[in-house]
Amino acid sequence: MPDNNVVENAIRPFVVGRKNWLFSCTPEGARASACIYSLIETAKASGLEPYWYLKFLFENLPEAMTADEFKALMPQNLDKNLLEFNDITPSQA
């Protein structure tokens, strides 16, 4: 039988977060939570550190005006070298 530890580890944050989503209060709040979670998980899947990706996104999102500019900010389209990633851990930032 194949080992499924990788899959179990990948969905663990989702399972933990699932209980928190019970407190979203409104469908709009639940959708907003799902969007943020999706961005974070896509950033991870794209090899980006979520903290640095979100920092970059929140700094650059106000300047995006066209659909192409918004698409360029998506984690799967982002060049890793654009992030301010350095030896500082997110807790030190």
Image (cartoon, grey):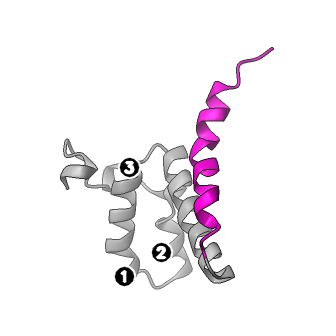
Q: Quadrant of residue 93?
A: bottom left
As drawn, is 29 to the left or to the right of 90?
A: right
Name the residue carrying label 2. Answer: 69
Name the residue carrying label 3. Answer: 80
Residue at image position (36%, 72%) is: 58
Near mark 2 (Cα within 10 A), the count class, few <14, some 14-19 or many ≥20, is few
Q: Quadrant of residue 4?
A: top right
The Cα atoms of the two marked residues, 3 and 1, are separated by 19 Å
Q: Are marks 2 and 1 in contact (CB under 8 Å)?
A: yes
Which residue occupies the foreground of this view, 38 or 5? 5
Q: Where's the N terminus, which quadrant? A: top right
The Cα atoms of the two marked residues, 2 and 1, are separated by 9 Å
Disc 3 residue type?
Answer: Lys
Q: Which residues are magenta?
A: 1-24
Asked if residue 16 is among those painted magenta in the image, a careful observer would answer yes
Near mark 1 (Cα within 10 A), the count class, few <14, some 14-19 or many ≥20, is few
Which residue occupies the foreground of this view, 38 or 67? 38
Disc 2 residue type?
Answer: Glu
Near mark 3 (Cα within 10 A), the count class, few <14, some 14-19 or many ≥20, is some
Name the residue carrying label 1. Answer: 63
Q: Position of residue 28 (x, y in %)?
A: 64, 82
> In the rendered structure, which disc, 3 or 1, sits on the residue that comes first in sequence?
1
> In the rendered structure, which disc, 3 or 2, sits on the residue that comes first in sequence?
2
Q: Secondary structure at mark 1?
A: helix
As drawn, is 5 to the left or to the right of 58?
A: right
**Residue at the right extreme?**
1
Residue at image position (76%, 17%) is: 2
Q: Secondary structure at mark 3?
A: helix
As drawn, is 42 to the left or to the right of 87?
A: right
Q: Position of residue 16 (x, y in %)?
A: 58, 50
The Cα atoms of the two marked residues, 3 and 2, are separated by 16 Å
